[in-house]
Image (cartoon, helix red, strand yellow):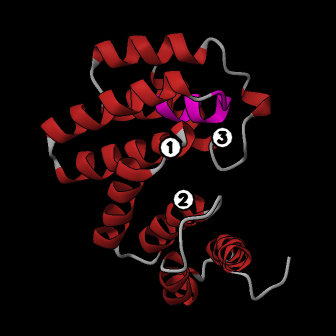
Amino acid sequence: AELGQRHVQVSVILNMLYCLIALNRPEEGLELAEQALTLGQFFTTDSLRANLAAAYNAAGQPEQAIRHYEELAACTTDPSLRCVAWTNLARFAHEAGETDRVREHLEQASVEGRQTSFPAMRARVAVALTLYGDDSDRVLARDILRSVDDATMPAWLTPDLKRARALL
């Protein structure tokens, strides 16, 4: 693959944005990532959109993050990325005090959590159910977390997972 190929450019920007988020410099990649989204729909485009939403959130631009998570939830065929979208949308709705939207987003996240084969995404759904949901959501979260081995979870999920387990 040559760097000039559009799908390669999308992948490069995806990885660059991930690194900039990790370096606490997400704003440096926003413009390039937006441009990369216009190059076409490729295997990594939806992951780029998820990273771009996270970068906007990290850069203090939640409205833009929400816009990208909504687009991701509506358009991706990947249930793991839909878990990312719906759990983040639930968090934003929770922070805004939008109880009905929290419920709607958690229900969607629960559906996607049953579709994904990625344990970290199921754990992410359980965390969202615990932190933003009601007692019935916490029962579901307990059921999900019974099959989750915390030792195999990614580092970015560990603090929230511990917090959720402490609340259950």
Instruction: Give the answer, above or below, for where 36 lies relative to 128.
Output: below
Q: How crowded is mark 2: few (under 14 residues within 10 Å), some or many (20 or more)?
A: many
- Image quadrant occupied by the N terminus: bottom right
What residue is at 48 percent from the left and 71 percent from the top? 58
Disc 1 secondary structure class: loop
Which one is earlier in the sequence, the residue at label 3 or at label 2?
A: 2
Q: Give the range drawn in magenta.
A: 117-125
* Residue at the disc numbered 1: 77
Which one is earlier in the sequence, the residue at label 1 or at label 2?
A: 2
* Residue at the disc numbered 3: 158
- Residue 38 location (% of width, % of height): 48, 80
* Residue at the disc numbered 2: 46
**Left or right: where does residue 13 sit relative to residue 114?**
right
* Residue 148 located within the stretch drawn in magenta: no
Query: Which residue occupies the foreground of this view, 133 or 87?
Result: 87
Disc 3 secondary structure class: helix
Q: Are marks 1 and 2 in contact (CB under 8 Å)?
A: yes
Q: Label 1 vs label 2: CA separation?
A: 9 Å
Residue farthest to the right, as pictured = 1
In the image, what residue type sits under mark 1? Thr
- Residue 85 location (% of width, % of height): 42, 49
In the image, what residue type sits under mark 3? Thr
Disc 2 secondary structure class: helix
